Amino acid sequence: MSFWDKLRRMLRRAGKRDAMRPKVASDTPNTETWTYPGAGIFYRCQLCGGIHEADQPDDFLDKVARCSATISASTQDLYRALQIPGEGGRWNIAPQEATFVFTRPGGEKCFADYGLIGSWNPETCSWLWAWHMPDFFDTHRPPETELTLVRRLREHGAQWGWQPLTEPLLYLGEPDSWHMADLAADLAGWPMVYRAKVNDSNYHYFAISRPVVAS
């Protein structure tokens, strides 16, 4: 075998090894210094601790596009029709009953079922799925009643091989943060999503059933 044949064989073997490696988002060994590049969905690997780009197959992207368009339109329609939240309005939740309460500026209340979907930090672009919160937080854990829907979404993602729905900690931009909630609402057959700022850094995202105005 000639020198060039040996070299070609070595390169082919190296290429196969590289193809089997996950896509790494940063070459630096210190992932704490990594910053979100502005597009795509990334995840923190539970095995190596590194940050990799998540696979987004065509069927996943098609589903996101379809349900996001539908849920966005129905959400805006309900906001306008029910005047929620409206200037001077407010929202509350009853976690044990998984009931969302919108209080309109005039004092009328709207009630709806809901599921907590995830938490997003706009500074770090980190997304924490609600189904991972009981393992992530020592205190202030969400009750089981809030997690029924998001756990269904995780199982759905596992069945379809949709990695972004099964990795507990993601890094994604604001549009994709809404898309995660849209996917949950679509799975439940609910027409609405909502986000609320819960502290100085984080927003919580909810999928919500059609609100009913209290009589």
Image (cartoon, rainbow, N blue to C red):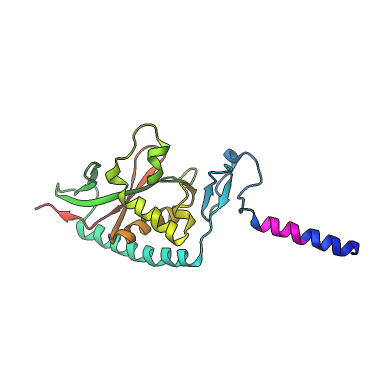
Relative side of 180 to 31, left or right: left
Relative side of 7 to 163, left or right: right
The residue most toward the left is 215
Q: Residue at x 34, y 37 (%)?
A: 141
Q: Position of residue 198 (x, y in %)?
A: 34, 40
The residue most toward the front is 1
Q: Exactly how many numbered labels are in the figure?
A: 0
Q: Residue at x 22, y 58 (%)?
A: 210
Q: Is residue 168 in view from this perspective?
A: yes
Relative side of 160 to 211, left or right: right
> Eyeballing the image, is 182 above or below 91?
below
Q: Residue at x 42, y 37 (%)?
A: 136
Locate residue 74: give its quadrant.
bottom left
Verify whether residue 13 appears in magenta: yes
Residue situated in front as seen by the camera: 103 or 24 = 24
**Magenta part of the protein: which range?**
12-19
Residue situated in front as seen by the camera: 112 or 110 = 112
Relative side of 123 to 17, left or right: left
Locate residue 139: give its quadrant.
top left
The quarter of the rendered structure image containing the N terminus is bottom right
The residue most toward the top is 139
Q: Is residue 85 in view from this perspective?
A: no
Verify whether residue 34 appears in magenta: no
Q: Residue at x 39, y 55 (%)?
A: 155
The residue most toward the right is 2
Residue situated in front as seen by the camera: 139 or 72 = 139
Q: Main secondary structure of the magenta part?
A: helix
Q: Position of residue 208 (x, y in %)?
A: 27, 54
> Eyeballing the image, is 30 above or below 161?
above
